[in-house]
Image (spheres, grey):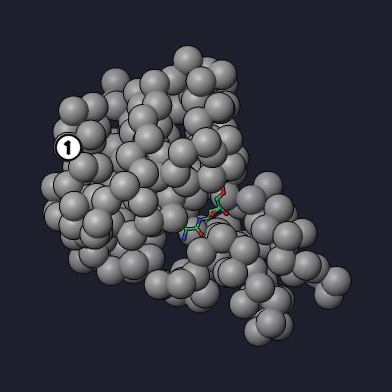
Amino acid sequence: MKNIVVLVSGGGTNLQALIDAQENGIIKNGRITCVISSKHDVYALERAKNHNIKSKVIARKDFNDSVEYSRAILEALNEEKADLVVYAGFMTILDELVVKAYPNKMMNVHPALIPSFCGKGYYGLRVHEEAIAKGVKITGATVHFVTEVCDGGPIILQKAVELNDDDTPEVLQKRVMEQAEWKILPQAVSLFCDDRLEVRDGRVFIKN
Ligand code: GAR
């Protein structure tokens, strides 16, 4: 059974999708052992509490710089003996010292089809604002392994979502979450826990 640590910063709907997948038996070979939030008083912490999952707040604002903050996160991950670390709406970029300690063991869900609308500055609603402004007809979500390049790691799963002419960023965000993120994130976690993901030459292959 793999220890899954989920990193959050906000509402935690992706965390909820993981909790539901665990409770419904979609994730069989892993357990969420700890939720770590980069902010105090976010709803994701309530979700953990409601399901008796341990949580910790390691607030970004309590640290001077990214390296100091990343060291604190790394210490917590080591303490939890994390086998998999999931960024579920985690809005802080960590120093590469964390990624180097957990190579191909950290995954992130991004609300667009990478390599579109990704990289530094593209997070949350901003991603959907840009997709609408550009007039793309299709967007979606991506789950990828985290590397030192922001949103640049090997892609595990993607799912496309169509835009409507009258979409607002909020409406589009909700559709992308419902139709893509909440589906592919639990799926990717399940594949990882079943040892079915193999990374070769920067690409992810799913083993049968
Ligand atoms: C989600 O749409 C997630 O993909 C996005 O923030 C939202 C968090 O929602 N993450 C990023 O933009 C990271 N670059 P949640 O807290 O309800 O899961």
- Which residue is most to the right? 166
Secondary structure type for disc 1: helix
Residue at position x 69%, y 82% in the image:
133
Amino acid at dot 1: Glu
Residue at position x 58%, y 69% in the image:
127
Q: Would residue 98 appear left or right of 86 to someone viewing this image?
A: left
Quarter occupied by residue 195: top left
Q: Would residue 151 appear left or right of 21 to someone viewing this image?
A: left
Q: Would residue 60 appear left or right of 130 to someone viewing this image?
A: left
| Residue 47 or residue 175, whichever sits in front | 47
Q: Is residue 129 visible?
A: yes
- Which residue is most to the top? 52
Up/down of 22 relative to 18, above or below: above
Horizontal and vertical percent for residue 35? 40, 31
Residue at position x 80%, y 68% in the image:
167
Q: Is residue 205 visible?
A: no
Horizontal and vertical percent for residue 197? 31, 45
In the rendered image, which residue does mark 1 sit on? Answer: 75
| Residue 46 or residue 170, whichever sits in front | 46
Total marks in image:
1
Within 8 Å: ligand 1 and the Cβ of disc 1?
no
Horizontal and vertical percent for residue 21? 53, 28
Quarter that holds the N terminus:
top left
Quarter occupied by residue 147: bottom left
Horizontal and vertical percent for residue 53? 44, 20
Quarter that holds the C terminus:
top left
| Residue 28 or residue 146, whichever sits in front | 146
Quarter occupied by residue 7: top left
Residue at position x 17%, y 37% in the image:
75
